[in-house]
C-alpha cells in the first residue's frame, strides 16, 4: 500500500457525461500527479499540482481539468466524455515539487468505462 | 484484474533464475530514471531509481544499470520469484523531474 488513495475504484458512465475522480496524497506529500493508462497509449502524464498550484502540464485534453485543494487532495474532472476516454486513471504523490529523486508513489487507480 | 496492454513484450523465466528487463529511453537530457512494477489491478509500485551521474545502483535483489552512451536502462532481478510476475515499466524524468515519461512496459512471467 503506497498511502495514496483514489476513489472511486470503478466508474461506468455514458458518452457526453462528466465525472470527477478524487485522490488523497500520502501524508506530508505536497505534489499530486495525474496519469492516464490506456491499452494503446500506455501511461501518459496529464498534470501536476504542487501545494495547490499547477506545476506541470502534459498531454491533458481541454475537456479535462484538475485542481488541488487546501487539504492537498486533488480532483480530476473529465467532461464531454468520449469512448476513447475509457482508461485507468492514476494519481501519484511526492514530497516536494518535483526534481530528481522526488519519488512518485502511485495510488490504486480509477477504472473509467465510457459506454 | 485489469490488463495493462495486450501486446507487451513478455519475458518468461524459471523460478530461481535471474531476469533482465531492458529499456531504451529517448531523451538524452533526462537526468533521472525509475523502474516501476505493476501487478494486475494495482498501480505502479516504485522499485529502484538511478540518477544520470551513476551507471549502477543496487537494491534488494534488484540492480539497475544505466548506459547513457546508448540510452539504455536495464533492471536485473536476482533469484526471480513467482511474486515478481508483473509488468515492469522504466520511466525517465525531465530536468525538473516533474513529468515521468514511461516506456511501453515488459511483462515478466515466472514459471514455478
Image (cartoon, coloured by chain):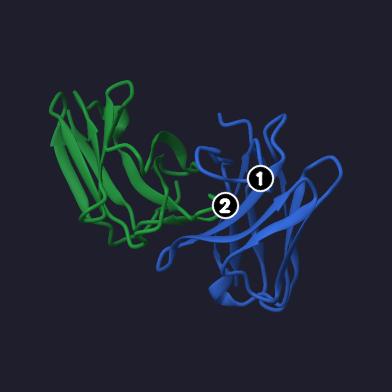
Q: Residue furthest front?
A: B53
Query: According to the image, label 2 marks what residue?
Result: B98
Quadrant containing the C terminus of chain B in the rendered view: top left
Front one among B47 and B56:
B56
Residue B86 at x, y = what percent?
33, 40
Q: Residue at x 26, y 52 (%)?
A: B23
Residue B80 at x, y = what percent?
21, 27
Q: Is A96 located above or below residue A60 in the figure?
A: above
Q: Residue at x 57, y 52 (%)?
A: B98
Front one among B111 and A70:
A70
Q: Secondary structure at mark 1?
A: loop
The picture quadrant where one finds residue B84 is top left
Q: Secondary structure at mark 2?
A: loop
What subunit carries mark 1? A
Count of marks overlaid on the render: 2
Circle 2: is it few (<14), some (14-19), or many (20+) Cα within 10 Å? Answer: many
Residue A53 at x, y = what percent?
78, 54
The picture quadrant where one finds residue A19 is bottom right
Q: Colour of chain A?
A: blue
Query: According to the image, label 1 marks what residue?
Result: A97
Q: Residue furthest top?
A: B60
Quick check: marks 1 and 2 in contact, CB under 8 Å?
yes
Q: Is residue A50 left or right of residue B46?
A: right
What subunit carries mark 2? B
Q: Colour of chain B?
A: green
Front one among B17 and B90:
B90
Front one among B103 and B84:
B103
Q: Is residue B87 left or right of residue A69?
A: left
Amino acid at each position: 500500500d503506497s498511502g495514496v488513495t483514489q476513489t472511486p475504484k470503478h466508474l461506468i458512465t455514458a458518452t457526453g457525461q462528466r465525472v470527477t475522480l478524487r485522490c488523497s496524497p500520502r501524508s506530508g506529500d505536497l505534489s499530486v500527479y495525474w496519469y492516464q493508462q490506456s491499452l494503446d497509449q500506455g501511461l501518459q502524464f496529464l498534470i501536476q499540482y504542487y501545494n495547490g498550484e499547477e506545476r506541470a502540464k502534459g498531454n491533458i485534453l481541454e475537456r479535462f481539468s484538475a485542481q488541488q485543494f487546501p487539504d492537498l487532495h486533488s480532483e480530476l474532472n473529465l467532461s464531454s466524455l468520449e469512448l476513447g476516454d475509457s482508461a485507468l486513471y492514476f494519481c501519484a504523490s511526492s514530497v516536494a515539487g518535483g526534481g530528481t529523486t522526488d519519488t512518485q508513489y502511485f495510488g490504486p487507480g480509477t477504472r473509467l468505462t465510457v459506454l | 484484474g485489469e490488463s495493462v496492454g495486450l501486446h507487451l513484450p513478455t519475458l518468461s523465466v524459471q523460478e530461481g533464475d535471474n531476469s533482465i528487463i531492458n529499456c531504451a529511453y529517448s531523451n538524452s537530457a533526462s537526468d533521472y530514471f525509475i523502474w516501476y512494477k505493476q501487478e494486475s489491478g494495482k498501480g505502479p509500485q516504485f522499485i529502484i531509481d538511478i540518477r544520470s551521474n551513476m551507471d549502477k545502483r543496487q537494491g534488494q535483489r534488484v540492480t539497475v544499470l544505466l548506459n547513457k552512451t546508448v540510452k539504455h536502462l536495464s533492471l536485473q532481478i536476482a533469484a526471480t520469484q513467482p511474486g515478481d510476475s508483473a509488468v515492469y515499466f522504466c520511466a525517465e524524468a525531465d530536468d525538473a523531474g516533474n513529468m515521468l515519461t514511461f516506456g511501453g512496459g515488459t511483462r515478466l512471467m515466472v514459471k514455478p
